[in-house]
Amino acid sequence: MTTASDKQDFHARLLQIGKERYHDKHPFHVMLHGGGCTITQVRAWVINRYYYQSRIPMKDAAFLSRCDDPQLRRAWRSRIEDHDGGLGEGGGIRRWLRLAEAVGLDPGYVASTKGVLPATRFAVDAYVSFVREKPLLEAVASSLTELFAPKIHSERIAGLLEHYAFADDAALAYFRQRLAEAPRDVEFGLGYVLDHADTREKQDAAAAALTFKTDVLWAQLDALYSAYVAPARIPPGAWNGRDGVIREPAAE
């Protein structure tokens, strides 16, 4: 069984994974936040990231379908509501499509997931499968990239506002909302993992799950960089830089 000191050490171990492996350090994000991306590269990011956003509630629904504990289901189901919203409005998916429109993309095209990179699909689908199939502790632990999300959202808001003409409150509503949602989610998820990872073996499995999730996020950016930055080799079927573009954002 773990002691308070063991929990502290394990918590520090989880934080170290994020410090070393979180995707805020990826060269594509450095470009994006620093104003170094072209509008085509920003659009490619929006299109591919939508696929990830759209699968989050599916991932959480798969998780809930496996939960015998009603208290755990009650705590977890708000995540689906956060992303899907209500029947008429709200939700992170709709806010992401407002970002798509702001960068000059047809929201319907983005929502169709046409043009998503094969590697994006592979990585995201692997994450959904992981949560569907792995023990609940590992499934919860894989969500703990939320520990590091507020920092990247804050940097993204500041960087996009400074460097891109399309950025305004409506376009960046997804990130502002997550500044409030992510800390609530991670408070529950972290507490669950620290309480239930009560052996070294379980701690190792939880740490491996968080590492896997950082790999999922990093792989998506690797695919974007390869297709739209260098060597700029767009794979067959991926977005060609033209489809779904409905207008150009206003000049700076």
Image (cartoon, rainbow, N blue to C red):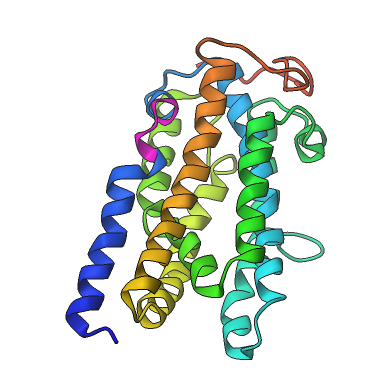
User: Residue at (80%, 32%) from the top-left corner?
Assistant: 109
Q: Position of residue 126 (x, y in %)?
A: 63, 49
Name the main secondary structure of what is drawn in magenta.
Answer: helix
- In this rendering, is residue 72 above or below 79? below
Query: Is residue 190 visible to us here?
Result: yes
Count of marks overlaid on the render: 0
User: Residue at (56%, 48%) from the top-left corner?
Assistant: 173
Q: Position of residue 46 (x, y in %)?
A: 62, 33
- In this rendering, is residue 175 above or below 139? above
Q: What residue occupies the far front of the structure in this picture? A: 201
- In this rendering, is residue 141 above or below 223? below
Query: Is residue 39 visible to us here?
Result: no
Instruction: Tell me: 160 left or right of 126.
Output: left
Quadrant housing residue 25: top left
Quadrant housing residue 102: top right
User: Residue at (36%, 65%) from the top-left corner?
Assistant: 204
Inspect the magenta stretch and tell me whether residue 25 lies in it.
yes
User: Residue at (32%, 52%) from the top-left corner?
Assistant: 17
Inspect the magenta stretch and tell me whether residue 72 lies in it.
no
Q: Nearer the viewer, residue 2 or 57?
A: 2
Q: Position of residue 229 (x, y in %)?
A: 51, 14
What residue span does the magenta drawing correspond to? 24-29
Q: Quadrant of the N terminus?
A: bottom left
Q: Nearer the viewer, residue 78 or 195?
A: 195
Q: Position of residue 26 (x, y in %)?
A: 39, 31
Q: Nearer the viewer, residue 14 or 42?
A: 14
- In this rendering, is residue 166 above or below 91? above
Q: What residue occupies the far left of the structure in this picture? A: 5
